[in-house]
C-alpha cells in the first residue's frame, strides 16, 4: 500500500502529542533543575530597586555625620541624628522588608543597635546587643561590600541585606534590612505556579493522548470489522473500494480466483457446506500467503482477489505464492461431513504486470480477462495475462466499443450449420464482429470481457438482433440463430424487440436464440418463464456450450429447448479423450430420448466429422464446413 | 488481602505518634526554646533541675518534660522560666531558685531575673546580666561569655 495522507491516518495524531509531551517533560525537568537559579534571578529582579534605595539610605546616613572620627559616638551623643536616621530607616519598611536597623560592632565583637525602625513593641534599645545567626556577618568587615545573607534556619526571615558605611576605609556601621519569608514565598509561589502550569498542561496532554489512543484503537477496530468479511475473515469489497486508489501497482501482481463449479457444491450439499468450503478456501489462501506482504479480498460470492507483493527479482516470487495457493487448494480435502470430503479446484487469472495499467480497475480487468481465459480453457488452471499477445488479444475499451456502436461498426459474420448426414445447409449462426477504426475485425474474445455485466452488452445484443432481422428480411428462406446473454432473456427492452419481430410474419420461426446455459439462467424463474414465452412466440431455442459448466438435464426438459449445442472444447477432444467421448455419447442419447436436436460445433476436420456422424449428431458446425463470413449464400 | 489490611492498620496505630503533628499545634519553636533553656539551666545550676513554668500549656508540658523534671509549684522548683506576660504575677521569691524570662524588658526592669531568652529581629537572643550572675554566684562556662552584659 502506498502511504496514506497524514489526515487520513489517526495514528499520526499521536506523533505531535508525543512530541509536545516530551517538550513539556523537558521544560518541567529544566524548571525543577533550575528552580534555585530561577528563584535567585526572580529575587534579583524584584529586589534590585530595594537594594538601590537601601544604598541611598546608607549614603544619606553617611552624609549626616559632621565628625568623621567616630560615627558611633556621633549618633549616641546626638538626638537629632538619631531621629533623622530612624525616620530614614522607617521609609525602608514595606510588607516584605520586616526590619531595617543600623548596627555597630563593639570592642568585644558584639553587634549592637544604634537605630531601629521597628514599632515600639519590637524596637531594640540603643546599644542593645544583637546575637547574629551566622558568621557570614563578619565577611562585610573583610570585603567592605554589600552582603546578602540567606537564612535557612530562621523561619520568619528569608534574606538579610547588609550595606557597610565606611569611615576612613573601615566598616564602622552596618545598615541592615531583613526580608520577611513572604518575599521568597511569593517567588516560590510563582515558580510553583509555573510548575503547576506545566504539570497541568502535561496532564491535559496526557489525557488527550490517552483519549486519542483509545479512540484510535476503537476506530481501528470498527474500521477493521467494516472491512473484514465475516464468513471468511479476509478483506471484503468495502476494503477494495476504500483503498484501491492507494494500492501501488508497482508493488503487486493481481490474481483473481474463482472456485470451479461452486454452484454445484451449493446445490448438491447445501449452502452451509458451501459456506464451509468458502471458509476453508479462504483459510487455505491465508495460510499460504505472506501475511506482511500479501492482501486477500473476497470481492464476490466465490471470487477472491489476491494481491501478492513483488520482490526485486520481479514478479516470480509473487507468482510462486499464487501457484502455492492453487496447488494447496487442489491438494486439500474439503470435508463436508466427518468422514466425507470433496475435491475443489479453482481457476486463477493473473495480471503479472499491473504497473502497466493506469488504474487499479484496469489492472484488475486484465486479471479478470485471464480468469475468463482460464475458465474457457476448461477451468482448474492458472492463466497469466500475456502482455506479448496483447496487441492481438487485449480487449477493446468500453469507449472503443461505444464508439463502434455509434459509428455502426457492429457487424455479424455468419457460419453455416449443416445437416451431418448430407452436409447441406440448415441455417446460420450469427457471430459478433466489430470493425475497429483501422478496419481490423475484432473477435468476441476481445469484446465480451470488457462489456460483461454492463449495459453495453445489452446494446450490442440489440444491434445484432437488428442486423439479423434485416438479413432475415433480405433472405426470406434463410434461418439465423443469434447468441443471447442470459441477462438479455430477462431484459424488458430486448423482450419487447423480440415480441415486435414475432408479430411479423415468418421472422420468429427463422430466428433462433442461442443461450449459454449458466448459473444465472438456470436459477432464475423469470428467465425460465421468458424462454417458454419466446418459444410460444415461435422462436427456436438453443442451449449453447452445453456440457461446459452448468449442464442440467432437468432444466432442459423444463424449458423444452429445441436444440442443444455441445460445447466446442468437448467436441475438439472427442477423438483423444474418452471422458469427452462418453459425455457426448450420453448427451446425444439423452437428447434423442427428450426429442432435442443436437449440434456439434468446432468440427475442424474430417475425423471429428466422421465421429460425430457415427454418434448420430444431426447437425454440425465448424471450419471443416465453412468459416464465418459477412455474406449469406442465399 | 484481609490480613494485609489488618497488618497495615496495626502498623499505622503503632506509628501513630509520628503523625500527631497533623492534628497538634506545631511545636518546633517550643522544642528549640526548651533545648536552649535546658542548656542554660544545666549551665547555671549544678543540681537536678526542677522546672516551673507559670501557666504552662499542655504542649509546653509535653515538650519540656523531655528535658526537665517539672515542678507543679513555684515553691518546689529550683528554676523558674517566666515565658508569659501576666501583669502582677504572684510568684515565689528568688531565694533558692533562679528566675529566667523570655522578655528583655522584664530582665532590665526586674532584678529577680538573671537572664533572658527572647526573639530579637526574629532571631533567638540570650542575655545574662553579669551583676546578677555574681549575686547568685552563677559561674557560666566560657562559651556563654558572648551573652553576658555588664549593665
Image: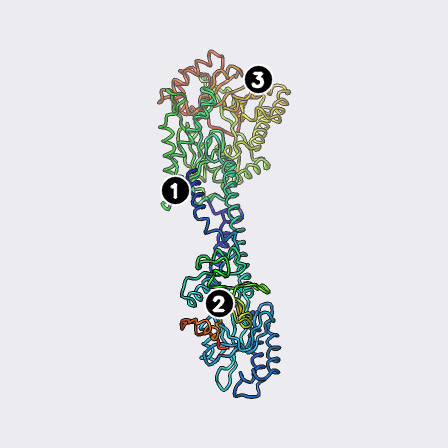
Residue density around tag 3, few if under 14, some if 14–19, many if 20 or more, within 10 Å: some
Label 2 vs label 1, nearer the camera:
2
Q: Which mark is residue A532?
A: 3
Mark 1 falls on what kind of element? loop
Q: Quadrant of residue A606?
A: top left
Q: How is the image coloured?
A: rainbow
Specify whether residue A541 is in view.
Answer: yes
A405 in relation to B28, above or below = above
Depth check, front residue: A239 or A121: A121
Q: Residue furthest top?
A: A593
A10 in relation to B62, above or below = above
Mark 3 falls on what kind of element? helix
Do labels 3 and 2 touch, CB within 8 Å? no
A629 in relation to A123, above or below = above
Left or right: B8 as drawn, with respect to A512: left
Residue density around tag 1, few if under 14, some if 14–19, many if 20 or more, within 10 Å: some
Alpha carbon separation for disc pair 2 and 1: 117 Å
Depth check, front residue: A382 or A422: A382
Q: Which residue position is annotated with label 2?
A: B95
- Pointer 1 or 3: first along the chain: 1
Q: Which mark is residue A315?
A: 1
In the image, what residue occupies the spot 41% across and 38% down?
A: B3
Q: Position of residue A202 (x, y in %)?
A: 52, 53
In the image, what residue occupies the spot 44% across and 48% down?
A: B15
Label 1 vs label 3, nearer the camera:
1
Chain where mark 1 sits: A
Amino acid at each position: 500500500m502506498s502511504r496514506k495522507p497524514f489526515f487520513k491516518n489517526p495514528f499520526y495524531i499521536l506523533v505531535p502529542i508525543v512530541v509536545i509531551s516530551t517538550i513539556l517533560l523537558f521544560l518541567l525537568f529544566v524548571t525543577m533543575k533550575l528552580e534555585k537559579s530561577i528563584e535567585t534571578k526572580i529575587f534579583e529582579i524584584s529586589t534590585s530597586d530595594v537594594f538601590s534605595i537601601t544604598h541611598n539610605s546608607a549614603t544619606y546616613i553617611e552624609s549626616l555625620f559632621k565628625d568623621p572620627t567616630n560615627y558611633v559616638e556621633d549618633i549616641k551623643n546626638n538626638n537629632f541624628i538619631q531621629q533623622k536616621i530612624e525616620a530614614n530607616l522607617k521609609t525602608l519598611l514595606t510588607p516584605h522588608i520586616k526590619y531595617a536597623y543600623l548596627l555597630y560592632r563593639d570592642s568585644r565583637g558584639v553587634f549592637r543597635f544604634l537605630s531601629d525602625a521597628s514599632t515600639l513593641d519590637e524596637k531594640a534599645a540603643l546599644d542593645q546587643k544583637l546575637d547574629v545567626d551566622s558568621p557570614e556577618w563578619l565577611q562585610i568587615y573583610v570585603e567592605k561590600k554589600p552582603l546578602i545573607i540567606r537564612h535557612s534556619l530562621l523561619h520568619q526571615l528569608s534574606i538579610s541585606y547588609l550595606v557597610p558605611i565606611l569611615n576612613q576605609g573601615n566598616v564602622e556601621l552596618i545598615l541592615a534590612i531583613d526580608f520577611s519569608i513572604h518575599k521568597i514565598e511569593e517567588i516560590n509561589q510563582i515558580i510553583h505556579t509555573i510548575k503547576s502550569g506545566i504539570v497541568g498542561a502535561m496532564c491535559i496532554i496526557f489525557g488527550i493522548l490517552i483519549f486519542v489512543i483509545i479512540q484510535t484503537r476503537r476506530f481501528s477496530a470498527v474500521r477493521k470489522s467494516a472491512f473484514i468479511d465475516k464468513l471468511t475473515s479476509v478483506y471484503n469489497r468495502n476494503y477494495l473500494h476504500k483503498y484501491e486508489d492507494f494500492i501501488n501497482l508497482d508493488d503487486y501482481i493481481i490474481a483473481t480466483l474463482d472456485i470451479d463449479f461452486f454452484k454445484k457444491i451449493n446445490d448438491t450439499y447445501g449452502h452451509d457446506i458451501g459456506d464451509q468450503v468458502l471458509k476453508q478456501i479462504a483459510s487455505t489462501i491465508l495460510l499460504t500467503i505472506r501475511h506482511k506482504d500479501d492482501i486477500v479480498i473476497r470481492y464476490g460470492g466465490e471470487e477472491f482477489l489476491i494481491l501478492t507483493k513483488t520482490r526485486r527479482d520481479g514478479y516470480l516470487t509473487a507468482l510462486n505464492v499464487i501457484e502455492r495457493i492453487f496447488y494447496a487448494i487442489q491438494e486439500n480435502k474439503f470435508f463436508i461431513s466427518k468422514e466425507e470430503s470433496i475435491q475443489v479446484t479453482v481457476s486463477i487469472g493473473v495480471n503479472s504486470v499491473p504497473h502497466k495499467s493506469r488504474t487499479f480497475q484496469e489492472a484488475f480487468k486484465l486479471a479478470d480477462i485471464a480468469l475468463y481465459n482460464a475458465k474457457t480453457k476448461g477451468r482448474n488452471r492458472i492463466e497469466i495475462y500475456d502482455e506479448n499477445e496483447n496487441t492481438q488479444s487485449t480487449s477493446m475499451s468500453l469507449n472503443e466499443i461505444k464508439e463502434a456502436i455509434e459509428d455502426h461498426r457492429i457487424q455479424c459474420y455468419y457460419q453455416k450449420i449443416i445437416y451431418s448426414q448430407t452436409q447441406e445447409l440448415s441455417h446460420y449462426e450469427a457471430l459478433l464482429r466489430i470493425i475497429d477504426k483501422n478496419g481490423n475485425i475484432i473477435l468476441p474474445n476481445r469484446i465480451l470481457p470488457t462489456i460483461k455485466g454492463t449495459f453495453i452488452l445489452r446494446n450490442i445484443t440489440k444491434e445484432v438482433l437488428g442486423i439479423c432481422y434485416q438479413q432475415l428480411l433480405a433472405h426470406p428462406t434463410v434461418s439465423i440463430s443469434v447468441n443471447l446473454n442470459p441477462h438479455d432473456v430477462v431484459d424488458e427492452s430486448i423482450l419487447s424487440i423480440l415480441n415486435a419481430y414475432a408479430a411479423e410474419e415468418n421472422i420468429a420461426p427463422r430466428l433462433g436464440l442461442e443461450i449459454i446455459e449458466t448459473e444465472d439462467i438456470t436459477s432464475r424463474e423469470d428467465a425460465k418463464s421468458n424462454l417458454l414465452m419466446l418459444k410460444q412466440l415461435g422462436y427456436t431455442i438453443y442451449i449453447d456450450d452445453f456440457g461446459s459448466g452448468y449442464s442440467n438435464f432437468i432444466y432442459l426438459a423444463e424449458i423444452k429447448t429445441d436444440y442443444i449445442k455441445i460445447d466446442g472444447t468437448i467436441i475438439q477432444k472427442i477423438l483423444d479423450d474418452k471422458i469427452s467421448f462418453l459425455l457426448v455419447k450420453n448427451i446425444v442419447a439423452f437428447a434423442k430420448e427428450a426429442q432435442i436436436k443436437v449440434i456439434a460445433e468446432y468440427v475442424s476436420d474430417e475425423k471429428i466429422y466422421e465421429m460425430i456422424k457415427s454418434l448420430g449428431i444431426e447437425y454440425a458446425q465448424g471450419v471443416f464446413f465453412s468459416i464465418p463470413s459477412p455474406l449469406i449464400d442465399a | 488481602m484481609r490480613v494485609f489490611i489488618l497488618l497495615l492498620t496495626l502498623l499505622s496505630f503503632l506509628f501513630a505518634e509520628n503523625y500527631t503533628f497533623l492534628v497538634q499545634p506545631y511545636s518546633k519553636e517550643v522544642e528549640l526554646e526548651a533545648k536552649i533553656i535546658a542548656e542554660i539551666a544545666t549551665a547555671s545550676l549544678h543540681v537536678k533541675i526542677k522546672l516551673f513554668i507559670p501557666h504552662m500549656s499542655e504542649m509546653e508540658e509535653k515538650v519540656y518534660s523531655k528535658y526537665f523534671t517539672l515542678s507543679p509549684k513555684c515553691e518546689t522548683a529550683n528554676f523558674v522560666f517566666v515565658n508569659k506576660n501576666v501583669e502582677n504575677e504572684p510568684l515565689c521569691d528568688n531565694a533558692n531558685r533562679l528566675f529566667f524570662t523570655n522578655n528583655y524588658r522584664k530582665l532590665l526592669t526586674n532584678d529577680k531575673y538573671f537572664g533572658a531568652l527572647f526573639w530579637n529581629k526574629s532571631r533567638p537572643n540570650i542575655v545574662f546580666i553579669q551583676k546578677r550572675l555574681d549575686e547568685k554566684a552563677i559561674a557560666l562556662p566560657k562559651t556563654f561569655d558572648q551573652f553576658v552584659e555588664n549593665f
